[in-house]
Amino acid sequence: MKKIIVTIPAGDRHREYLEKIGAGCEFFYTSPAAVTEDILRTADIIIGNVAPKLLTCAQGLQWLQLNSAGSDNYCAPGILRPGVLLTNATGAYGLAISEYMVGMSFLLQNRFYQYYGNQMARRWKDQGPVTSVWDSTALVVGLGDIGGEYAKRMKALGSYTIGVRRTAGEKPEYLDELYTTESLDQLLPRADFVALSLPNSPSTRHIMDERRLRLMKPGAYLINVGRGNAIHTEALLKVLEEGLLGGCGVDVTDPEPLPENHPLWAAPRMVITPHISGQYHLSETFERIVRIAGENLEKFLDGRTEEMRNLVDFETGYRRR
């Protein structure tokens, strides 16, 4: 009998769904904060995130299903034993985060954040010209579920969409052009919106350094929902203070959480949210996570592990293709 540790906040309906698929298995429900080494020593399967440092004691673990799309913290050597399967929740967050990104795009270009500041100060003031998504160019860097869903929405709103991905592949219909990361320098000057939805890896750290930030079109907007270290924070402060960018909206920062006294809080044309675009704020996100876990549980128990969704390549930190 396999023991399945579930750390996501599964309600009665979700438990019934998982237990029907895993008939004959023993389920133990807890929370990430309540997980102990003793619990993990008994686990054959874990559904939900667990502090990576605790997983070294899970010697019987065969498969870990994350409730996050990012999996880089679990790919480091020594966290999971060789042979343990790792799957993430890619496909669950595209709806919520892409709509956040579209909302951030409108907020920046229409200066809504400035008008809200005026409202708080009871100041009746025209903030000047705005731009439009229609007839703009959106450069989407990172074309997983999140980046792809954002590109679809921007194209539907009349934007010319350009995608950048790590490896070459067939261009999806929601993109007008598709390139690999090597072409990023040539693409940045063309874009009115630059949207980052990248995982944490050596190749993505500071991918937007000062040189690349200065390659952006004057007045363009930068949005980041992937990892805070994709943008060099000090360089971003510099170009914002110089007035190069039309605005920047981020749901992730470097460092994170952003300290109270950090100068990024007061940077001009800067909008910051505390890593909330995903999580479970949209109930459908959690429903999708449960469905991914259930589908993968069925395939795992049937021995069809190669058919499981979102199997992670430990060397790259990305989904296997």
Image (cartoon, rainbow, N blue to C red):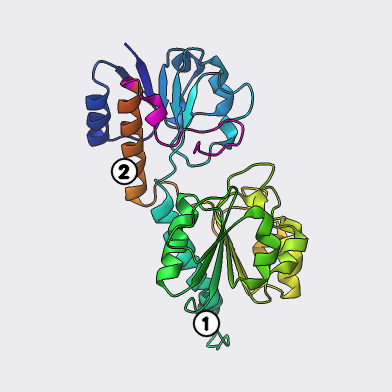
For the residue marked with disc 2, what is the amino acid?
Glu
Q: Is residue 319 magenta?
A: yes
* Residue 66 image point, x, y percent: 45, 33
Residue bearing mark 2: 287
Q: Residue at x 54, y 81 (%)?
A: 131
Q: Secondary structure at mark 1?
A: loop
Magenta span: chief secondary structure: loop
Q: Name above or below for residue 80 compared with residue 171.
A: above
What residue is shown at x 68% (from left), y 76% (from top)? 218
State the residue position of label 1. 122
Q: Position of residue 215 (x, y in %)?
A: 73, 68
Task: Evaluate if marks 2 and 1 touch, with contact meaning CB atoms under 8 Å apart.
Answer: no
Q: Residue at x 40, y 46 (%)?
A: 91
Q: Is residue 27 left or right of residue 188?
A: left
The range drawn in magenta is 301-321
Q: Nearer the viewer, residue 141 or 51?
A: 141
Q: Position of residue 162 (x, y in %)?
A: 55, 64
Query: Which numbered disc flags the more N-terminal residue, 2 or 1?
Result: 1
Q: Is residue 258 visible?
A: no
Q: Image check: 200 left or right of 174? A: right
Vertical relation: 249 (above or below) 92: below
Quarter of the image holding residue 290?
top left
Which quadrant: the N terminus? top left
The answer to whether residue 55 shows anywhere in this view is: yes
Left or right of residue 236, residue 149 in this image: left
Q: Nearer the viewer, residue 256 or 56?
A: 56
User: Residue 180: horizontal and vertical position, in percent?
Assistant: 61, 54
Residue 67 vs 123, above or below: the answer is above
Q: CA distance from mark 2 to mark 1?
A: 42 Å
Disc 2 secondary structure class: helix
Q: Amino acid at mark 1?
A: Arg
Q: Is residue 184 magenta?
A: no
